[in-house]
Amino acid sequence: MIFWMWREIRLLAASKPVIASMSDVAASGGYYMAMGAGVIVAESLTSTGSIGVVTGKFNLGKLSEKIGFNKEIISKGRYAELHAAEQRSLRLDEAELFSKSAQHAYKQFQDKAALSKSMTVDKMEEVAQGRVRTRKDTASHGLVDAIGGLSRAVAIAKLKANIPQTG
């Protein structure tokens, strides 16, 4: 879902000035969407980034047994239960697929971040790795384009859209 939002923001930014203004926190999903904008403005204390993927799978089998909950799954296909079978541990082949899926999601996020911020993937890898950055550290690492609040973002938008600045 978030990929499609990023894509639409990026398509719009190709034809109109799109400025993202981040306030307190813009990590993970918030930053993912902001990357589609032509310019990203963050306040000096904004928590920014978290270009990373966190995933996991619970095994609730013993809990379900303890409380008397029974769930039956009818499925067809080798990996049909990958996300539905919370009553058991993953099989080795499922765990491998789950891990590859998370690695693929991280690579996609990292590649989009590198593209959006005009960095090489290697440079983005140095910056990314799931870190959350704050303060002006984000600008020095190229994750945001300007430090300031909403008024700064509006001023940049007016400038890019050739709208006169008013007091």
Image (spheres, grey):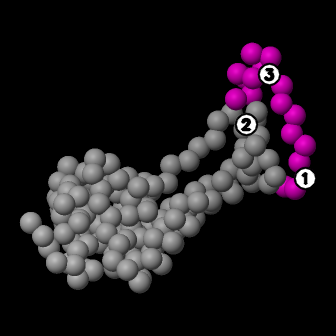
Q: Earlier in the sequence, mark 2 or mark 3?
A: 3
Q: How crowded is mark 2: few (under 14 residues within 10 Å), some or many (20 or more)?
A: some
Q: Is residue 159 left or right of residue 54?
A: left
Nearer the observer, 157 or 128: 157
Residue plotted at (41% across, 82% down): 14
Q: In which quarter of the image is residue 99?
A: bottom right
> Mark 2 belongs to which amino acid?
Glu
* Residue 97, image x, y percentages: 69, 57
> Mark 3 belongs to which amino acid?
Phe
Q: Is mark 2 on a helix, strand or loop?
A: loop
Residue plotted at (76% across, 33% down): 87
> Mark 1 belongs to which amino acid?
Lys
Q: Chief secondary structure of the magenta span?
A: loop
Q: Residues within 10 Å of mark 1 (few under 14, many from 20)?
A: few
- CA–CA distance in space, label 1 to label 2: 17 Å
Q: In this view, does 87 lie above or below 140?
A: above
Q: Is residue 93 above or below residue 155?
A: above
Identify the residue under disc 3: 69
Identify the residue under disc 2: 86
Reply yes or no: does residue 40 show up in magenta.
no
Look at the image and give the residue range highlighted in magenta. 60-78
Please say if the residues under marks 1 and 3 sit with CB atoms less than 8 Å apart: no
Q: Quadrant of residue 32?
A: bottom left
Reply yes or no: does residue 73 show up in magenta.
yes
Q: Quadrant of residue 115?
A: bottom left
Q: Can residue 20 be seen in this view?
A: yes
* Residue 152, image x, y percentages: 18, 64
Identify the residue under disc 1: 76
Q: Is residue 103 left or right of residue 131?
A: right
- CA–CA distance in space, label 2 to label 3: 12 Å
* Residue 77, image x, y percentages: 87, 56
